Image (cartoon, helix red, strand yellow):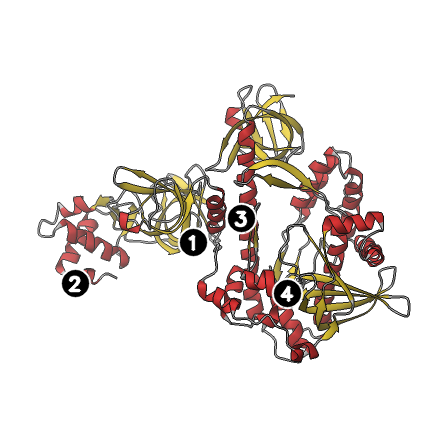
Amino acid sequence: MKKKNKRFRNSEEYQQVLNVLIQKANTLLNYKQIAAQVDSISKKDVSLILELLERDRKIEQRQRGKYIFVKTRDEITGVLDFSQRGDAYLVSENLDKDIKLKAGSTLDAFNGDEVSVRLVYSKSSDRPKAFVTKVLKRARTTYVGTISQGGKASFIIPDSSKIHTDFYVPKERLKGAVDGDKVLFKYRDWPSNAKNPYASVVEVFGQSGDNTAEMHAIVAEYGFATKFEDRVEDAAAKLPKKITNEEIAKRMDFRKVTTFTIDPEDAKDFDDALSFKKLDNGNFEIGIHIADVSHYVQPGDIIDVEAYNRATSVYLVDRTIPMLPERLSNELCSLRPHEESLCFAVIFELDIHGNVKDYKFSKTVIYSDRRFAYEEAQEVIETKKGDFAYEIEVMNSIAGKLREAKFANGAINFETTEFRFELDSNGKPISVTPKERKDAHKMIEEYMLLANKYVAMHLYTKNKKTPLPYRVHEEPSAEKLAEFAETAANFGFKIETGDYKSYAKSINEMVTKVQGTVKGDILQPLAIRSMEKAYYTSKKIGHFGLAFDYYAHFTSPIRRYPDLITHRMLFDYLTKKKSFDYNEVEKMANHCSGQEQKAVSAERASIKYKQVEFLSSYKGEEFEGIISGITEWGIYVEIMENKCEGMVRLRDMRDDNYNFYPEKKIVVGQRKKKTYSMGERVFIRVKNTDLAKRNIDFEFVRE
């Protein structure tokens, strides 16, 4: 509390101001109206006393700068959810239905903030009116926006469509930002007599529209830092590159065993390698060697704290924001070709049919003989020629058996097509092409899944007291299953919903039939949406989509913090050290799940930005698309040839008045009864694009 306020507490002036509000109970008054009734107190002091009375919870600020005294209180807490139109709703566990707040009754609360709200009931309505009385917890401390300067005043226009006010920035808090700059800013306060909230610039990204500025702004928007602090970089720089003989002596030595990596062509961090050796009994020893990040990053050190806070690398269209400094991610921990590297491995003995005969865990040292891009490995698979052709052929054959067994056990096969943007030298998209997922990708995936599964299974079955950040995927709800089954039936497919294994089998049969077809483009994304989201928890729930009873992430500690936790726990178990407790792991798991969702949102935001940028060159052109979503305000359409998604707004559909039926997820015209439904093929024209809002507007052009 400001010291200058304290002198008024319980003073004569304090009581005078309070009495004015008591006498005018249930009437909103601003400080000027109150000051007019207490001539002996200056307007400045009245403002100070009002701040004090509000802090003492004697009065409430129902609207900005307007105060009221209320004898009785009925308050609850909740979270504010603002719509893009500016409407504010209170979401609370104490309410059976969200409450809409009147304009001007949210004080200085923004979207997502946890607030205390006063409910006022009246005889004329069964729904109470709600007024924010206090912001309890900010959803975020920083925001992203663009500087707008006019005359001597500077404002920030926030990027978020859910923040409906501009922020005033005093000149001394601009940090060198100029008109048009994209910035990260911090909310300071919102004086009761000010029209706009006050803010200060934290970081200047560059001019709005510049590719790097926009990508960094997206990263910051979701709470990730684009750079590491100097002290973190310095700590990473001090880590030794040389692998000592003492360290090698502690590990299984695979330096003379055939070992290679297979990664995307543009990858810089290689966190997994495969070793291969044929055994005398006819079986094969296949090692899944994972970068030993835990050797370099110790619990609680400065790099570990930073990695935990980030929890994941963030993958944008044109760049990666790493979880670890590049000294680690691209150098010390990267399993680069023709270099010795330290790993933590799961080593399997497998027969040619994919049956696991034995397995073990060990810290290893490897020497990667070859770095394959996926395309190079795929060529070896298809031609049976090239480096390590025999090894790759055998490993691919075994991976195929593992894959067959997985689906036979009830795993679900989702083969969605992803697209990549080709960018020019300025980062502008010039084309969109599909990413092909072939046998080389599937081979690596199966060995990573195998390692993850066996680590989780071993730790759980050998010592149930060892907590893990399990990667779990819960069974879908009966409602979602029935909804998708109904949609699939419209396309001629019967989806069994009696039990989950039958459901998975019928989904896989459908996927096989529609793969590479228009129906596949429609049904597979809808099937994925019917699933629950995977997340991390210390509870062993299992993974529905993979049909695994035990599953944890182990194979990517360079880019995922849960994998690093799993490495530490496995090593603690093997060396009989004390592990984490459940409460600690659950806290970490929740944090990592939250960060993962933010990273996914940032990735999608970068894709959306590039989609808008790409279609900006195609205004007025027509495309064939698929209805991918239907809401009360519009119909989402995904263009088939490039996966760019936009909306046909109901208010722009002038041929009829259309109504939305949420239970059926359809839109129907009142007069002509024209119906639009999910998955329907349509033709659209690109009507408008808005880069600032990342919006694409379409219009229907023909049947």
Location of residue 342 in the rendering, given as x and y in whole percent from the top left corner = 66, 70
Tell which of 229 and 547 is nearer to you: 229
Tell which of 404 and 5 is nearer to you: 404
* Residue 241 appears left or right of 250: left
Location of residue 447 in the rendering, given as x and y in whole percent from the top left corner = 75, 59
The CA distance from mark 4 to mark 3 is: 28 Å
Tell which of 562 and 111 is nearer to you: 562
The CA distance from mark 2 to mark 1 is: 33 Å
The CA distance from mark 2 to mark 3 is: 48 Å
- Label 4: element kind: loop
Location of residue 392 in the rendering, given as x and y in whole percent from the top left corner = 81, 56
Of the numbered discs 2 and 3, the one sitting upstream in the chain is 2
> Could you tell me if the residues under marks 3 and 1 are in contact, i.e. CB atoms within 8 Å?
no
- Residue 467 visible to the viewer: no
Location of residue 703 in the rendering, given as x and y in whole percent from the top left corner = 65, 21
Disc marking residue 7:
2
Of the numbered discs 4 and 3, the one sitting upstream in the chain is 4
- Label 3: element kind: helix
Measured along the vertical axis of the image, is residue 499 above or below residue 299? above
Residue appearing at x 47%, y 37% in the figure: 693
Disc marking residue 140:
1
On the image, which quarter does residue 653 sit in?
Answer: top right
* Residue 6 appears left or right of 537: left
Q: Nearer the viewer, mark 2 or mark 3?
A: 3
Measured along the vertical axis of the image, is residue 672 above or below residue 519? above
On the image, which quarter does residue 634 sit in?
Answer: top right
Disc marking residue 605:
none
Would you name the residue on which mark 4 appears?
Answer: 539
Measured along the vertical axis of the image, is residue 486 above or below residue 6? above
Of the numbered discs 3 and 1, the one sitting upstream in the chain is 1
